[in-house]
Amino acid sequence: MDLTVVVASYNARDVLRACLASLRTAGPSLAIEVVVVDNNSRDGSPEMVAAEFSEVTLLRNEHNEGFGRANNRALKIARGRYVLCLNSDTVIPEGSLEPMIEFLDENPDVGIVGCRLERPDGELDPACKRSFPTPVSALARFLHLDRIFPNSRVLGSYRRTFEDPAGRYEVDSVVGAFMLVRREVIQEVGGFDEDFFMFGEDLDWCWRVKRHRYKVFYLGDQRVVHHKGASVRTEPQKMNWHFHRAMFLFHKKHLVERYPFFVNWAVYTGISVRYALKSLGMVLGLGVRKPVSAESIREAEGS
């Protein structure tokens, strides 16, 4: 088995269908198994998978266990030389997986590979290539200074806005929506930290992988369509909480000992303020994205 594709899904039936359909042609020369872990969806997702994708192994959780825990369940039974942790709201173009598998075969020191993630309109999802956060880069991100000064290596360091999005280079982290991982890495490092319910677990995993002296690479010449946030939009307030909680967890786990107490206090205060503002915006109906439409899914399938 060349590749095990793991898809954790929660109330994302329509995008999940498009994702699984794209996997049928994503690596025609590869021996691929697909495992879907359903986090107790209520929209008919598991029934759809069982009825339309007989080749897929379907695991059902009795409760929403979160992203990391769901993926870890599938990692225990994965048989592939490589494992692709894939979001349900992605569409992979035909033949896209072979070049990335080939890259890993040729570079045994690389543990994780990510690729260029694009929105259905072709806009780059900047989270697909990142550096580990620092207080300065986090502040720049919160204040959108990375958008104002994208060529700055300081202000644009978190999302690496100063680098060519079409290039190939080493990064600190790729995003959990698409993480192609060497099997030996999982055996050495372990799976996702289940303290992270959703968000942050990808940064944490890449941090631990790099501590084992493996490299994390971004392949900008390979693209995948990412609708982004299909599951998040079903419970925005809950996901907003988990998003900001993940920031606390990551800083406390990996960064708190690097900085004096007043810097840590400033970081935690900043996260709390940002959470409060985002929550208020949701209550007022500001900045809430609409659910993914069937039309946008069809456009992505045809891209």
Image: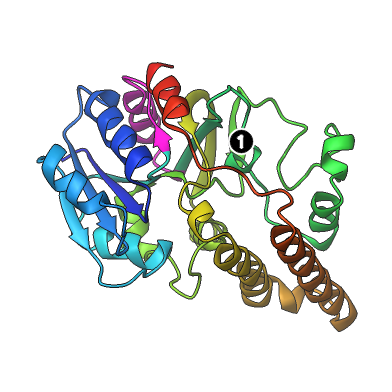
Q: Quadrant of the C terminus?
A: top left
- Looking at the rendered structure, the secondary structure element under dot 1 is loop
* Residue 229 point in image, percent of width and height: 52, 47
Q: Residue furthest front?
A: 284
Is residue 77 highlighted in magenta?
no
* Residue 24 point in image, percent of width and height: 22, 28
Image position of 71 with respect to 24: above or below: below
Asked whether 113 or 292 is in front, the reply is 292
Image point (18%, 50%), residue name: 47
* Residue 166 point in image, percent of width and height: 61, 22
Query: Which contiguous range is marked in magenta?
Result: 90-112
Image point (71%, 65%), residue name: 279
Q: Amino acid at mark 1?
A: Asp
Q: Is residue 1 visible?
A: yes
Q: Quadrant of the N terminus?
A: top left
Image check: 264 left or right of 213?
A: right
Question: Which residue has dot 1 on it?
Answer: 125
Instruction: Give the quarter of the image for residue 78.
Output: bottom left
Is residue 92 highlighted in magenta?
yes
Image check: 271 left or right of 72?
A: right
Q: How is the image coloured?
A: rainbow
The crowding category of the residue bearing disc 1, from other C-alpha atoms within 10 Å (few below 14, some 14 to 19, many at least 20), is some
Image position of 271 with respect to 222: above or below: below
Q: Is residue 53 visible?
A: no
Asked whether 101 or 145 is in front, the reply is 145
Image check: 85 left or right of 29?
A: right
Image point (41%, 66%), residue name: 66
